[in-house]
Structure formats: structure tokens, C-alpha cells
Image (spheres, rainbow, N blue to C red):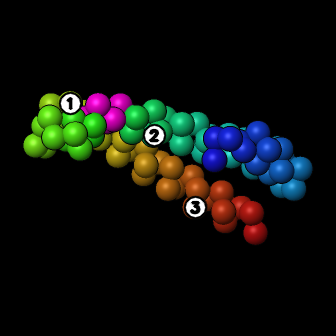
Amino acid sequence: MRKREYVNLALVHRLWGKKLANDFTEIMSLVKQIDDLIHELNTEAVAVVSGKQETANLAVTKPITDNIKPLVKDLESKIRLFLIKLY
């Protein structure tokens, strides 16, 4: 989705106007924040997959997942409203 972000933004702006383009930009910002946090989990995931650790270290993963949860809720809400506005 990031690869085509600006193409998609241009399409939204052209077809539905500036307000929805701004909404799309907010959605993409949340997507990027969530993506960045998920990437922070990679070190633990690699350690588990490679067998270096049996399970992920909750001291590392819990703060990350705690930060992800409200962002996902906000993203779900914004996407739902965005889709409703399209029609």
C-alpha cells in the first residue's frame, strides 16, 4: 500500500475531493505508525523463529502491542467512516 500511496491519494482527491483526500492521508499516517511498531517486533520474532528463544520476551513485546492496540481501533473507525463517505 505504501508503494502506491501517492497514486491512491491522487485518485481519492480527483474522484472524491480534498476532504476525503485528507481523510485518506490520516488513514495512511495510522497505517505507517502501526507498520513501524510491528517492525519493532521483528527482533523478538527472529529470536523465536531461529530457536534462540522459546517465546517472545513480554517485557519487549507488551509495550509495543499496547501501543498498537489503540492505533488499530482508531484505524478501524477511520476506515469505516471513510468508506461510508465514498458512497
Q: The magenta stretch spans which residues? A: 40-44
The image quarter containing residue 71 is top left
The image quarter containing residue 29 is top right
Q: Earlier in the sequence, mark 1 or mark 2?
A: 2
Toward the viewer: 40 or 53?
A: 53
Q: Residue at x 45, y 33 (%)?
A: 36
Identity, as a three-letter code, of the amino acid under mark 1:
Val
Q: Earlier in the sequence, mark 3 or mark 1?
A: 1
Which dot marks residue 80?
Answer: 3
Residue 65: x percent and y percent? 29, 41
Mark 2, residue position: 34
Identity, as a three-letter code, of the amino acid under mark 2:
Ile
Mark 1 to mark 2 CA distance (whole Å): 16 Å
Q: Residue at x 10, y 43 (%)?
A: 54
Up the image or down, 48 lies above or below 11; here it is above
Q: Look at the image and say whether residue 42 sits in the magenta stretch.
A: yes
Residue 59 as seen in the image, left or right of residue 83: left
Residue 39: x percent and y percent? 40, 34
Mark 1, residue position: 60
Identity, as a three-letter code, of the amino acid under mark 3:
Arg
Mark 3 to mark 1 CA distance (whole Å): 31 Å
